[in-house]
Image (tube, rainbow, N blue to C red):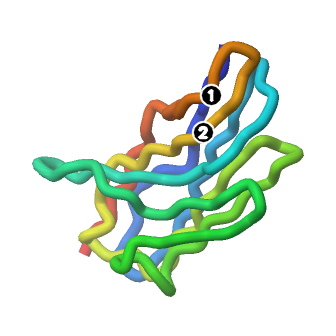
Amino acid sequence: QVQLVESGGDLVQAGGSLRLSCAASGSMLRINDMGWYRQAPGKQRELVATISSGGGTDYADSVKDRFTISRDNAKKTVYLEMDSLEPGDTAVYYCYANILTRLRRRDYWGQGTQVTVSS
């Protein structure tokens, strides 16, 4: 069974940095796109950043030039380096991966990790 496990969420002061990790495990044939979403209290889940299997990246305008997404295909892990954090970045961050198994191709989600930025 495929699982995504996130780590790295924490409480940090504005202007600080955090690095989130998300590792995929289980039986799979291929990992396609990977990425991060976030959901703040009372708001809809929003896309933060994505990275293709070839390394192409895309970011929400609100995080461009502050966040960097990367992946290690050998470790089946996606990272989100977050710099110059702002209180508006406070949210639960969820990773996802589009994964091909023997049965199907679908999106898998992590359980979420809390990021809190204090002013």
Q: Position of residue 57 (x, y in %)?
A: 61, 70
The residue at the point 41 percent across, 65 percent down is 12
The N terminus sits in image quarter: top right
The residue at the point 72 percent across, 46 percent down is 77
Q: Which mark is residue 105?
A: 1
The C terminus sits in image quarter: bottom left
| Residue that badge 2 annotates | 98
Q: Position of residue 22 (x, y in %)?
A: 62, 43
The residue at the point 42 percent across, 62 percent down is 48
Q: Is residue 97 above or below residue 13?
A: above
Which of 101/111 is in front?
101
Q: Secondary structure at mark 1?
A: strand
- Asked if marks 2 and 1 touch (Cβ < 8 Å), the reply is yes
- Tell me the mark number nearer the camera, choosing from 2 and 1: 1
Q: Is residue 93 above or below residue 52?
A: above
Q: Which mark is residue 94?
A: none
Which of 109/118 is in front?
109
Taking the view exactly as shown, the residue that stands out farthest to the bottom is 65
Where, by quadrant of the figure, is residue 102 drawn? top right
Q: Is residue 22 above or below residue 52?
A: above
Q: Residues within 10 Å of mark 1 (few under 14, many from 20)?
A: some
The residue at the point 57 percent across, 43 percent down is 7
Mark closest to the chain's N terminus, 2 or 1:
2
User: Please, what is the three-letter code of the amino acid marked with disc 2?
Assistant: Asn
Taking the view exactly as shown, the residue that stands out farthest to the left is 42
Q: Is residue 57 above or below residue 33?
A: below
Q: Residues within 10 Å of mark 2 (few under 14, many from 20)?
A: some
User: Please, what is the three-letter code of the amino acid marked with disc 1?
Assistant: Arg
Q: Position of residue 99 (x, y in %)?
A: 66, 33
Q: Secondary structure at mark 2?
A: strand
Which of 80/17 is in front?
80
Spatial CA span between label 2 and label 1: 7 Å
